[in-house]
């Protein structure tokens, strides 16, 4: 696991600045405290910070081909590097190390840019072909590892984090208003955009080529689903459950590859419990597990429910990590590492978890990805109900919603029923935005509201793939969650929080072969009679205790509703005061102050929204204005 960065001038004979490359590389020290490497040559500068996990002795980067012209720096893990190495050796390639990243060099020599399609893992890498004067950037299929780029003054800059690009000192810090539109719609920024107008992220499953100052990108992978009437109708539920368990167990086994000890982040839920239980079958005993406990009793599911480490059938060494209101003081650190105001409700507790884990371990397995693949979020149930009424006239849907409210039925589905429609970005925003702390329109500044209202988007946040209209509605939502929510919110927060403490978090559910299998499971086995992740529960029936198999999902989030009713540190209080809000220009100072007052008085629950507001105010200070973090 590493942090990578680089510089590629349009003039392939120009030598990048060694001092600039050093500054960019140093900005990623937290991602790789075990070592540093650079490659500087006409047309290219590559930098890497290393977190040593595989091949501790000879795995330093950059890594070059046998005769030298192809050089790579990479972040992540290639889980199928052993069979790839065997095949490449048979083709006459010579290896200098046992590093998993070295196979990328030789795959490129054999297959060119198409070699990325043979990789199984989580990765972002940069490869320089000195003969062709070509730079190749690539990112894993699910976007588990980040990669950003910008072009300024005819030069391409890239890095694992935006701060590496900004460290070059040549990229403007202008705010992208289209990214603010995303934040106001979804609660996070989507697609290639970042909050910085000049910085873009390479999309999951994409490659970027830079040759003679010309930049092109292309997709090498996408997630697809069977047509609504397709699939395998003769396959039984038991057979689907067996397929899923076998594939997940294989993935867990692959994710244990390491030359250092591997632990697990464990919650009371089925996802991390499944990974930990399968892990205990293959990893050296006992497996160290790390679980978060909260001072706020209603949200402390570890104390209320217990975790797998309380069952004698599993050889586990449990660690419980306390997390309390004092974590709010670390919000500047969270925003600095996240480089975004989104998902801070995940970042704050995960930073505490990662700091504790780092005292003993460099690698953990986690349960992320299951909710996106197997219908774990409440909006799956909401959308399933809403889709039944899509063909009804709008007035009829309003009457149904009103009748439901009169008889005491509450909930998001009644609120959304009048506007229910087939899956598209606007409907998806209605489903997920409120749950993610999206500030309501009344809290944004008047100027920003007017701009968003009178100007249509420059382009759609994303485009649906061919055949999308023929998929089952549940599969359409599955696609949006996997391609939009997962990389931009869930694994973004996981990567940034874990790497802030130099911990590699691995996600067996997001092995692309597991993902592709889940895309073929019939929707009625994913959500059955209101039970989310039915097929996963069935697959784990003889692996996990019955109470964990039956346990409904509870979100893993910080109890910010309670935390933000307390006085904040002076710097954070200042950011919510009228002068600071007015100076940044994103929010209406009076409306924010009113929301804060009502929240602290217990009249409303606005903790998530206030956290997003604080996050954007901090982001503006740290990144748009380049103020120091301290």
Image (spheres, grey):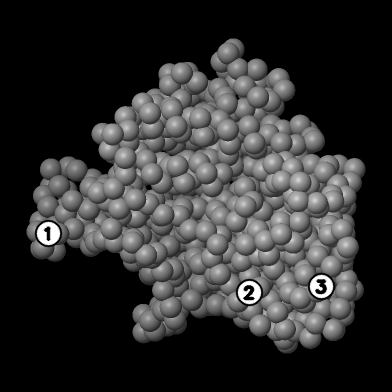
Image quarter (top left, top right, bottom left or bottom right) of the C terminus: bottom right
In the rendered structure, which disc, 2 or 3, sits on the residue that comes first in sequence? Answer: 3
Q: Is residue 47 above or below residue 247?
A: below
Quarter occupied by residue 434: bottom left
| Viewer-proximal residue among 627 and 153 | 153
Q: Residue at x 33, y 30 (%)?
A: 237
Query: Which residue is disc 3 drawn over?
Result: 130
Q: Is residue 143 left or right of residue 398?
A: right
- Distance from the alpha carbon under mark 1 to that under mark 3: 61 Å
Q: Position of residue 483 (x, y in %)?
A: 47, 57
- Foreground disc of the pair 2, 3: 3
Any mark on residue 199, and which?
2
Q: Give the camera-side residue of 281 and 426.
A: 281
Q: Is residue 356 left or right of residue 495?
A: right
**Considering only vertical position in the picture, is 191 above or below 214?**
above
Residue picked out by circle 1: 392
């Amino acid at each position: 696991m590493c942090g990578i960065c680089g510089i590629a001038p349009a003039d392939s004979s120009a030598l990048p600045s060694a001092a600039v490359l050093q500054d960019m590389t140093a900005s990623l020290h937290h991602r790789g405290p075990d070592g540093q490497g650079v490659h500087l040559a006409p047309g290219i500068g590559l930098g890497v910070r290393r977190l040593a996990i595989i091949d501790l002795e000879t795995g330093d980067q950059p890594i070059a081909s046998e005769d030298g012209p192809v050089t790579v720096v990479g972040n992540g893990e290639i889980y199928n590097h052993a069979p790839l190495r065997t095949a490449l050796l048979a083709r006459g390639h010579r290896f200098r190390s046992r590093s998993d990243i070295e196979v990328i060099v030789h795959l490129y020599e054999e297959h060119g840019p198409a070699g990325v399609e043979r990789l199984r893992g989580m990765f972002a890498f940069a490869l320089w072909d000195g003969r062709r004067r070509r730079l190749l950037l690539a990112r894993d299929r699910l976007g588990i590892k980040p990669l950003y780029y910008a072009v300024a003054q005819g030069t391409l800059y890239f890095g694992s984090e935006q701060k590496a690009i900004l460290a070059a000192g040549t990229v403007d810090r202008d705010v992208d208003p289209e990214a603010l539109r995303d934040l106001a719609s979804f609660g996070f920024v989507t697609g290639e955009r970042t909050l910085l107008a000049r910085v873009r992220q390479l999309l999951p499953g994409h490659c970027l080529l830079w040759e003679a100052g010309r930049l092109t990108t292309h997709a090498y992978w996408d997630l697809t689903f069977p047509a609504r009437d397709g699939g395998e109708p003769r396959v039984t539920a038991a057979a689907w459950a067996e397929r899923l368990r076998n594939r997940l167990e294989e993935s867990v086994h692959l994710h244990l590859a390491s030359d250092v000890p591997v632990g697990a982040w464990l919650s009371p839920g089925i996802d991390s419990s499944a990974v930990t239980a399968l892990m205990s079958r293959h990893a050296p005993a006992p497996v160290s597990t790390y679980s978060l406990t909260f001072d706020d009793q209603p949200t402390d599911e570890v104390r209320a429910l217990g975790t797998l480490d309380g069952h004698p059938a599993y050889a586990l060494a449990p660690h419980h990590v306390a997390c309390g209101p004092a974590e709010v003081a670390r919000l500047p650190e969270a925003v600095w590492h996240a480089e975004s105001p989104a998902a801070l409700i995940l970042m704050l507790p995960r930073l505490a978890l990662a700091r504790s884990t780092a005292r003993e371990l460099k690698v953990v397995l986690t349960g992320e990805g299951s909710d996106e693949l197997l219908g774990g979020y409440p909006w799956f149930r909401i959308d399933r109900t809403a889709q039944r009424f899509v063909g009804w006239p709008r007035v009829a849907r309003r009457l149904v919603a009103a009748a439901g409210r009169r008889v005491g039925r509450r909930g998001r589905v009644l609120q959304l029923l009048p506007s229910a429609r087939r899956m598209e970005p606007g409907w998806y925003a209605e489903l997920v935005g409120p749950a993610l702390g999206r500030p309501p329109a009344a809290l944004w500044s008047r100027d920003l509201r007017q701009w968003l209202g009178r100007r249509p988007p420059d382009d759609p946040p994303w485009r649906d793939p061919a055949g999308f209209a023929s998929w089952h509605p549940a599969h359409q939502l599955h696609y949006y969650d996997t391609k939009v929510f997962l990389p931009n919110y869930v694994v973004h927060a996981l990567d940034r929080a874990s790497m802030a403490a130099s911990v590699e978090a691995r996600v067996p559910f997001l092995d692309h072969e597991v993902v592709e299998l889940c895309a073929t499971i019939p929707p009625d086995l994913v959500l059955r009679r209101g039970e989310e992740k039915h097929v996963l529960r069935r697959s784990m029936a003889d692996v996990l205790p019955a109470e964990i198999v039956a346990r409904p999902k509870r979100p893993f989030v910080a109890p910010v509703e309670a935390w933000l009713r307390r006085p904040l540190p002076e710097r954070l209080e200042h950011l919510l005061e009228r002068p600071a809000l007015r100076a940044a220009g994103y929010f209406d100072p009076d409306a924010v102050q009113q929301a804060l007052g009502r929240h602290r008085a217990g009249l409303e629950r606005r903790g998530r929204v206030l956290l997003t507001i604080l996050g954007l105010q901090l982001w503006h200070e740290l990144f748009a204005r380049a103020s120091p973090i301290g």
